[in-house]
Image (cartoon, coloured by chain):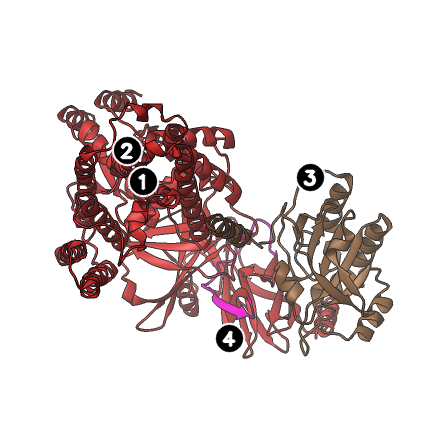
């Protein structure tokens, strides 16, 4: 009986001390979201392929900078062509900027000629809070083993001016290339810039 | 709106159209470019201001916008030779947006920029100064805006004194002030700990304090920043941000203080240097897991010899002698081992959980609480009285926890093991310190493994005796001598009780001490009453029970509101700032981390630190002796211990003069060793 108590104490302790912080090198928290087609999308299903999580809000000028210039779509195509999974996640709460119905989201995707693998509608904000998503855009890369390899901004110049994209260091594509080659990501944490996520 | 401005900019190139303006307006913002003086004086600094006026509920951002947002930017177009400096940022507000935090300005703000005016200027020239300003203005949604502004200024002639715009001084008043005190930081349990001393502030004066780093990365803006005063040092716990500071980097930012009386907000510029110490063992553990397991095993073995364990050993011996004829001593040895192991693992689990919850605890933390000391005191007293034959367990109150060790049978031996661990917990044997220090910074599984190794080492002698009880056959047959042995072995227990009383006296005031003594008296009386042969068993049990309960009640009352005694000031007390200060004054520093309940510490002090030879050496070499008293909980000391890979006391550090990392002295000191170390530190 005592052994049982001891074991239970141990297990409870171990469970409590397992932290849920989102950190480079730690396993990415698993989640299941609903995409615009009503299908369930689970992160762990993609184990073995790199996954890019892009928090987005079509009303935010910083997101518009990357979509109007075609930069985001270009990166989405490059990533998915190489076998990575690109999930665009909208964590705006109902009534707030960026919140869209599935139909509206699909229309936006078509209009902007975006090619994410799926657009996940997270109106409760659970997935956003799970990852600590603060801005739109906020980018995360999950490597083939399910661990976080990159957290931060899409590039190095925090502005709304599309002309700055060409001058900036392209953090996301560089990190993604390193993940795909199996190399450690040199710059794995950068400042995410943009509007705040409208939880 | 942006299009209109763009149009104006385009059109301004066409002659005949109105020139570019010194102000711009959008729906949310009115922006104006101002100069402090109405003429530029050669070879001086001319201050320019960008004055933003915002409509209600909208805000722009500080240099570090926080979790989201963007700081305003300026691109200057200046005449040749003129240079623009950095924007001087007034103290921002903390703006909460849901779960995120931004730093920014609402209502109005003027950003001042120093422009250096070169000496040689042609006279009577009108200079044109232009600025391309871009900013993000937000309410809940954000709008990026920009403006092109331009002003013309004459160059001052010799002897001219241009008039100044006095509003600029009002703006300067909103800049963060220089801090009167000294700021330093070090890495804590889950972030950075900022220590600011000599501020002259009192806790009651302050309604709130928060810190914002100048740049993104080191500190997470949206997490709470608990603060407290440690004597007159302000200590803030800052949650680490996404890009932690590099080793040795300075923490630069702003401390914003809100006055309780006037509710006014003031900002202070902070440039905190890291406190010079060994880097946290969590980054580079100096001990590997295997080494730690070996040290734990050895430490456990040596723990058997520690003075606080000896009394319980006496109970162990008695019970072993009782079981020798049975031939079941092997199983008893194992039961003892199981008891030790299980209680150590539970203790480890408790420590892990509490530390995960944020408490800065180390080994021996149990004895930092007065009520634990009183409880152990009662326990020792009760066990001693039992061995003295004052009462025995059989009927009535049989089964109460403390009497479990008296049960013959495996269960009794198991609980003797548990008891051994409880009493041994405040002692730190040699090697144990390093092993435990390592264990408490590692993942929970490794911590538990080290504690298990400790348990095995501790119970090894008993288990070996259990399996090879040949020595037991050397003992005479059971007889009256056993009773005499029992009575004699009660005295080590009384000695431990006396020692616990002394520890208590260091922790609480006289009235609480009297309460503990009164409780002990009631407990003793109750137990004696229990041992009396009375016909009416119910009466006897009831009275005994009442007395025991009364003593327990006293325990709770005195332990709970035990007032902490002010520390005796025979030795200067330790603080990290004092160490750096003394080093700067070219003194070597000897730091002794000790606690009243730590026997090893007391022995070392007697034998090696308080001797005449050592005192003389300290005087001659101008070495200052600081004491860190860990008798009651002290988070600063806990952190310092952790940083040196230890989880408990003693810890001896010898700092060289000027600056540098300290030498760590061994846990068991001799006078010779200390003298050698002192001469070594001053030789260089």
Q: Tell me the subunit letter for badge 2.
A: B
Give the SS element for disc 1: helix
Q: Residue at x 28, y 60 (%)?
A: B201
Q: Is residue B585 visible?
A: no
Query: Label 1, on which residue?
Result: B424
Quadrant assignment, res A86: bottom right
Q: In the figure, is residue A122 to the left or right of B396?
A: right
Query: Label 4, on which residue?
Result: B107
Quadrant assignment, res B488: top left
* Measured Cα–Cα span from mark 4 to mark 1: 63 Å
Contact, CB < 8 Å: mark 2 with mark 3?
A: no
- Of residues A9 and A52, the one nearer the viewer is A9
What's drawn in magenta, residue-wise? Answer: B77-99
* Measured Cα–Cα span from mark 3 to mark 1: 47 Å
Q: Nearer the viewer, mark 4 or mark 1?
A: 1
Q: Main secondary structure of the magenta part?
A: loop
- Closer to the chain start, of discs 4 and 1, is 4
Q: Tell me the subunit letter for badge 4.
A: B
Residue B309 is situated, as x and y percent measured from the top left of the image, at 28, 37
């Amino acid at each position: 009986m005592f052994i049982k108590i001891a074991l239970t104490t141990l297990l409870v302790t171990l469970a409590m001390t397992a932290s849920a912080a989102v950190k480079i090198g730690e396993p990415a928290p698993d989640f299941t979201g609903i995409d615009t087609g009503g299908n369930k999308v689970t992160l762990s299903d993609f184990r073995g392929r790199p996954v890019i999580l892009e928090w987005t809000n079509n009303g935010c000028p910083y997101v518009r900078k990357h979509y109007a210039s075609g930069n985001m779509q270009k990166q989405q195509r490059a990533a998915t062509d190489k076998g990575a999974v690109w999930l665009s996640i909208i964590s705006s709460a109902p009534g707030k900027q960026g919140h869209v119905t599935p139909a509206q989201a699909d229309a936006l995707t078509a209009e902007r000629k975006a090619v994410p693998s799926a657009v996940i509608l997270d109106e409760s904000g659970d997935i956003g809070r799970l990852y600590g998503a603060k801005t739109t855009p906020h980018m995360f890369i999950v490597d083939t083993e399910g661990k976080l390899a990159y957290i931060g901004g899409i590039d190095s110049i925090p502005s709304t001016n599309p002309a700055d994209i060409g001058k900036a260091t392209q953090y996301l594509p560089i990190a993604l290339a390193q993940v795909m080659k199996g190399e450690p990501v040199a710059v794995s944490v950068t400042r995410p810039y943009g509007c705040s996520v409208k939880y | 709106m942006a299009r209109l401005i763009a149009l104006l900019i385009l059109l301004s190139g066409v002659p005949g159209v109105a020139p570019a303006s010194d102000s711009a307006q959008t729906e949310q913002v009115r922006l104006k470019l101002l100069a402090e003086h109405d003429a530029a004086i050669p070879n001086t600094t001319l201050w320019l201001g960008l004055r933003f006026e915002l409509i209600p509920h909208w805000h722009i951002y500080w240099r570090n916008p926080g979790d989201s947002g963007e700081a305003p930017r300026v691109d200057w177009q200046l005449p040749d030779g003129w240079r623009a400096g950095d924007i001087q940022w007034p103290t921002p507000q903390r703006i909460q947006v849901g779960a995120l935090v931004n730093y920014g300005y609402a209502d109005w703000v003027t950003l001042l920029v120093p422009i250096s005016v070169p000496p040689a200027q042609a006279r009577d020239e009108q200079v044109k100064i232009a600025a391309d300003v871009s900013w993000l203005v937000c309410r809940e949604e954000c709008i990026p805006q920009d403006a092109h502004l331009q002003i013309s200024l004459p160059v001052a002639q010799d002897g001219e004194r241009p008039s100044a715009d006095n509003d600029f001084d009002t703006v300067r008043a909103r800049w963060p002030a220089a801090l009167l005190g000294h700021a330093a930081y070090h890495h804590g349990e889950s972030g950075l700990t900022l220590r600011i001393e000599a501020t002259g502030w009192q806790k009651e004066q302050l309604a709130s304090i928060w810190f914002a780093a100048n740049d993104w990365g080191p500190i997470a803006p949206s997490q709470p920043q608990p603060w407290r005063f440690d004597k007159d040092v302000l200590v803030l716990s800052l949650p680490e941000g996404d890009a932690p500071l590099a080793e040795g980097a300075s923490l630069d930012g702003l401390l914003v203080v809100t006055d309780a009386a006037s509710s006014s907000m003031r900002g202070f510029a902070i440039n905190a240097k890291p406190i010079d110490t060994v880097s946290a063992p969590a980054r580079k553990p100096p001990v590997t897991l295997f080494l730690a397991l070996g040290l734990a095993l050895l430490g456990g073995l040596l723990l058997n010899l520690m003075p606080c364990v000896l009394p319980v050993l006496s109970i162990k011996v008695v019970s072993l002698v009782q079981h020798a004829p049975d031939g079941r001593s092997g199983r008893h040895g194992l039961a003892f081992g199981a008891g030790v192991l299980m209680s150590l693992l539970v203790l480890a689990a408790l420590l892990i959980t509490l530390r995960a919850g944020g408490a800065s605890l180390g080994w021996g933390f149990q004895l930092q609480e007065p009520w634990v000391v009183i409880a152990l005191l009662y326990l020792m007293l009760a066990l001693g009285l039992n061995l003295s034959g004052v009462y025995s367990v059989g009927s009535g109150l049989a089964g109460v926890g403390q009497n479990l060790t008296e049960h013959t049978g495996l269960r009794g031996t198991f609980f003797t093991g548990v008891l051994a661990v409880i009493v041994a917990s405040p002692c730190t044997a040699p090697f144990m310190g390093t092993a435990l220090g390592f264990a408490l910074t590692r993942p929970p599984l490794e911590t538990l493994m080290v504690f298990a190794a400790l348990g095995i080492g501790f119970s090894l002698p008993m288990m070996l005796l259990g399996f090879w009880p040949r020595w037991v056959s050397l003992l005479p047959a059971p007889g009256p001598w056993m009773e005499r042995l029992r009575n004699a072995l009660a005295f080590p227990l009384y000695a431990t009780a006396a020692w616990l009383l002394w520890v208590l006296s260091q922790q609480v005031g006289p009235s609480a001490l009297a309460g503990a003594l009164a409780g002990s008296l009631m407990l003793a009386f109750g137990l004696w009453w229990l041992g009396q042969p009375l016909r009416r068993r119910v009466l006897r049990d009831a009275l005994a029970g009442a007395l025991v309960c009364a003593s327990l009640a006293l325990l709770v009352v005195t332990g709970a509101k035990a007032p902490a005694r002010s520390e005796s000031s025979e030795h200067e007390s330790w603080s990290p700032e004092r160490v750096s200060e003394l080093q700067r004054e070219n003194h070597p520093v000897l730091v002794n981390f000790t606690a009243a309940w730590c026997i090893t510490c007391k022995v070392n002090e007697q034998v090696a630190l308080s001797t005449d030879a050592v005192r003389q050496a300290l005087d001659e070499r101008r070495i200052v002796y600081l004491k860190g008293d860990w008798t009651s909980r002290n988070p600063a000391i806990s952190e310092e211990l952790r940083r040196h890979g230890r989880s408990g006391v003693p810890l001896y550090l010898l700092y060289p003069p000027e600056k540098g990392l300290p030498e760590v002295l061994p846990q068991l000191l001799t006078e010779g060793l200390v003298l050698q170390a002192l001469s070594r530190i001053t030789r260089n």
